[in-house]
Amino acid sequence: MNAGKSLPEQLVAPHPDVAPLPYAAPFETGTRVLRGIPYALRDGMRPLELDLWLPGTGGGPAPLVLFAHGGAWLRGRRDDMGFRLREWSPGPLARTAAEGFAVACVDYRLSGEAAFPAPLDDLGSALRWLTLRSAELGIDTGRTVVWGESAGAHLASLLALTHTGPPLAGAVVWYGPSDLTTPRGGFSPDNPATPEALLLGGAPATVPERARAASPLSRVHSGAPPFLVVHGEDDTMVSCSHSRDLAAALDKTGAHVDLRLIPGADHGWAGLTDDRVESIFTGSLRFAHGLVS
């Protein structure tokens, strides 16, 4: 066993690229879930992990939703699609898998662990790993929709706009920041204590090149995949102007963009009735289906 390897070499866990996959536990919706799969190793820190929801067996490789959670780049759980959806049973990820998608919800390095572009690099690493193991997993990463909420929507937008492999099928962006360079709402690029400054490793005004690189609005190009951009008109945490300007920039290049501004909605869909939150989710899922069908 492990012939030719030293004891220290034998003690190290297998690399995520070749490690055995965990058991796919059945779920009540007929879906399956693999939890806590390491997908990347970073020096000096924990392995980064993802959970993978899979649809029922049969039907060929499933299209993929790659989900990025919110939390101001400071905190958050990989399986959390926002506080208004936390009590759903089955939850939104299981429901998405029941509709025929594989759903990967991923850890990424938070701002207390590493500065930008670390979290964006982590999403790219997750997609690379999922592609490498796609045959075993029964997924088709050539049909990937990246979906994020709040800070995760910011990262989802950036991944959709900067991914250098096969183009993503599209992006679903819920109330995400798109511009880290200019004052909007209560945000000031001169303030070193904002979540944006912590993400960048300095007040945006003091690291202007990094702030532009971290702004989806600055990365828009004519080859962008289709975007669904959804934002509450009464958002008090991330100004709705972020989404308006991102959608306008995408439209100007000729990229497909569907902008949906939600009257009466604050951040995280606060202020909406349950049925309106349900409608936003089902509409987003319908958009994703249209990209991979």
Image (spheres, grey):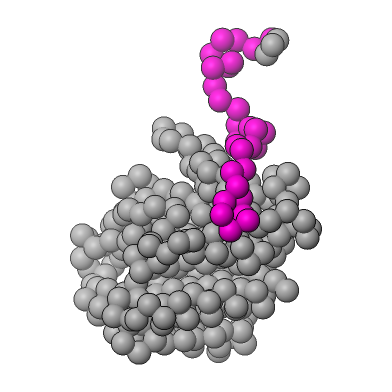
Residue 5 is covered by the magenta coloring: yes
Q: Residue at x 73, y 74 (%)?
A: 293
- Identity of the residue furthest to the front in this view: 28
Image quadrant of residue 64? Answer: bottom right
Give the camera-side residue of 269 and 178: 269
State how many labels appear.
0
Percent of width and height locating residue 183: 27, 78
- 229 horizontally vs 33: left or right: left
Q: Residue at x 50, y 51 (%)?
A: 106
Q: Compared with residue 21, is residue 134 higher up or lower down, i.e. above or below?
A: below
**Residue at x 55% of width, y 41% of height:** 37
Where residue 251 appears, as percent x and y from the top left, is 55, 88
Residue 202 in percent (x, y) is at: 28, 57
Q: Position of residue 103 (x, y in %)?
A: 58, 58
Using residue 47 as the reference point, say whether residue 151 is left or right of it. left
Most foreground residue, 235 or 8 = 235
Residue 145 visible from this viewpoint: yes
Q: Residue at x 75, y 47 (%)?
A: 135
Nearer to me, 205 or 165: 165
12 in the magenta segment? yes
For the N terminus, which image quadrant? Answer: top right
Main secondary structure of the magenta stretch = loop
Q: Which residues are magenta?
A: 4-32
Q: Quadrant of residue 176?
A: bottom left
